[in-house]
Image (tube, rainbow, N blue to C red):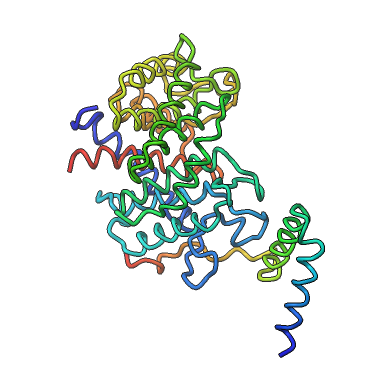
């Protein structure tokens, strides 16, 4: 329930400060996306998901 | 470039078989899980291993490979007519639209790279796939890619220029955008002016046989549609240094080339009925002296396999 006001405050601060500088905005955006990608799936994945004959009805 | 088979079908079947031999490997490079956010991404180091921060747009050219695979009804191709192959091709097209930069370009090695090569080649692969599958083209993404290409150039890399020429013309006609067709024509004039009197299209200020074969097949596809006389003459001139550099056994010395490329793209020679060159090249492959897709790393394997499969598909299309 506190998330939406917190988010609003955060983005308002962000837009008024660092977000006003295009290069900083770009860098923050890039780092955030990078972090999101890394959080979603760790590195050092095992070798899997290769093609298997069961994938197709040949 | 008549509608007769340009070279013997048994020869192009050999190329087709070599390409089909790589299908399982190529499918393994793609995210084939429809529930995944990255469904349709064929850059395995990106979607699976997370080794890189940007998906290589050139990996999405797999859509072109899969669409030919879906349509090529030959005995050696058990994947023809498989609906899942078609779905994966469409997924690859869809993913391509998601990784475009805001300015219309695409990346190959790192984020915000704005790669001319990735933009030109991947757009062409996607357009070919769309035409083969008769799918609805992603108008806006293609328009933005062509807009970016028409404002950029790579004078030292003729094969990249040739890809841009072909995609600008193809998309211009597809979307009825005259400005792209004209831009492609202007780039063609520049490319032909850069060709040396010996027929060499410059690659880093000199001759590179492997890259010359790429330029030649892209220009051949362009000329086949536009019937451009100047372009046709340039292709014929461009064949000369290739014929001269190719040894009788079908091999060539990559170390003397400006970019030291070791591969040979046969499509132009197939389309123009250069039976002798095709014979020699296949003999070199048979003798394990020439590179084939199986010897290459994943990124180059896909590109060369596409060319082999297209060599087979173009002849199959004429014969059926």
Q: Is residue B204 left or right of residue B4?
A: right
- The image shows residue B138 at horizontal and vertical percentages of 41, 54
Work out whether B278 lies above or below A52: above
Q: Is residue B288 left or right of residue B14?
A: right
Work out whether B248 lies above or below B288: above
**In which quadrant is the N terminus of chain B drawn?**
top left
Of residue B148 and residue B45, the one placed in the foreground of this image is B148
The part of the image, by quadrant, that contains residue B43 is bottom right
The part of the image, by quadrant, that contains residue B162 is top left
Q: Residue furthest right?
A: A17
**In which quadrant is the C terminus of chain B drawn?**
top left
Q: Residue at x 33, y 40 (%)?
A: B173
Q: Residue at x 36, y 37 (%)?
A: B178
- The image shows residue B293 at horizontal and vertical percentages of 47, 41
Q: Residue furthest top?
A: B197
Q: Residue furthest bottom?
A: A1
- The image shows residue B95 at horizontal and vertical percentages of 49, 59
Q: Is residue B37 left or right of residue B9?
A: right
- The image shows residue B179 at horizontal and vertical percentages of 41, 36
Of residue B274 and residue B225, the one placed in the foreground of this image is B225
Q: Residue at x 77, y 59 (%)?
A: A20
The part of the image, by quadrant, that contains residue B241 is top left
Of residue B192 and residue B311, the one placed in the foreground of this image is B192
Of residue B81 and residue A3, the one placed in the foreground of this image is A3
Work out whether B33 lies above or below B199: below
Q: Residue at x 53, y 29 (%)?
A: B262
């Amino acid at each position: 329930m506190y998330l939406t006001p917190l988010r609003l405050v955060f983005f308002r601060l962000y837009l008024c400060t660092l977000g006003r500088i295009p290069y900083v905005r770009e860098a923050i955006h890039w780092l955030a996306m990078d972090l999101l990608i890394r959080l979603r799936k760790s590195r050092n994945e095992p070798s899997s998901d290769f093609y298997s004959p069961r994938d197709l009805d040949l | 470039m008549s509608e007769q088979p340009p070279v013997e079908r048994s020869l192009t079947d050999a190329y087709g078989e070599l390409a089909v031999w790589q299908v399982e490997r190529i499918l393994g490079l793609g995210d084939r899980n429809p529930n995944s956010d990255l469904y349709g991404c064929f850059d395995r180091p990106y979607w699976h291993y997370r080794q890189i921060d940007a998906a290589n747009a050139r990996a999405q050219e797999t859509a072109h490979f899969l669409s030919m695979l879906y349509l090529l009804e030959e005995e050696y191709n058990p994947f023809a007519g498989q609906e899942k192959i078609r779905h994966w091709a469409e997924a690859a097209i869809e993913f391509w639209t998601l990784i475009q930069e805001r300015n219309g370009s695409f990346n190959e090695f790192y984020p915000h790279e704005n790669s001319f090569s990735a933009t030109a080649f991947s757009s062409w692969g996607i357009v070919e796939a769309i035409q083969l599958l008769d799918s609805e083209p992603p108008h806006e993404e293609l328009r933005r890619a062509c807009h970016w290409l028409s404002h950029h150039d790579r004078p030292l890399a003729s094969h990249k220029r040739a890809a841009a020429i072909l995609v600008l013309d193809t998309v211009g006609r597809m979307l009825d955008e005259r400005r792209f067709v004209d831009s492609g024509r202007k780039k063609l004039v520049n490319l032909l002016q850069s060709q040396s009197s010996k027929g060499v299209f410059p690659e880093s200020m000199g001759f590179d046989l492997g890259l010359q074969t790429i330029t030649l097949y892209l220009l051949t596809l362009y000329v086949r549609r536009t019937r451009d006389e100047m372009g046709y003459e340039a292709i014929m001139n461009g064949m000369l240094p290739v014929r001269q550099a190719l040894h009788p056994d079908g091999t060539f010395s990559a170390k003397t080339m400006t970019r030291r490329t070791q591969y040979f793209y046969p499509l132009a020679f197939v389309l123009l009925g250069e039976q002798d060159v095709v014979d020699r090249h296949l003999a070199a492959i048979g003798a394990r002296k020439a590179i084939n897709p199986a010897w290459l790393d994943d990124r180059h394997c896909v590109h060369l396999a596409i060319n082999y499969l297209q060599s087979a598909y173009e002849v199959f299309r004429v014969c059926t």
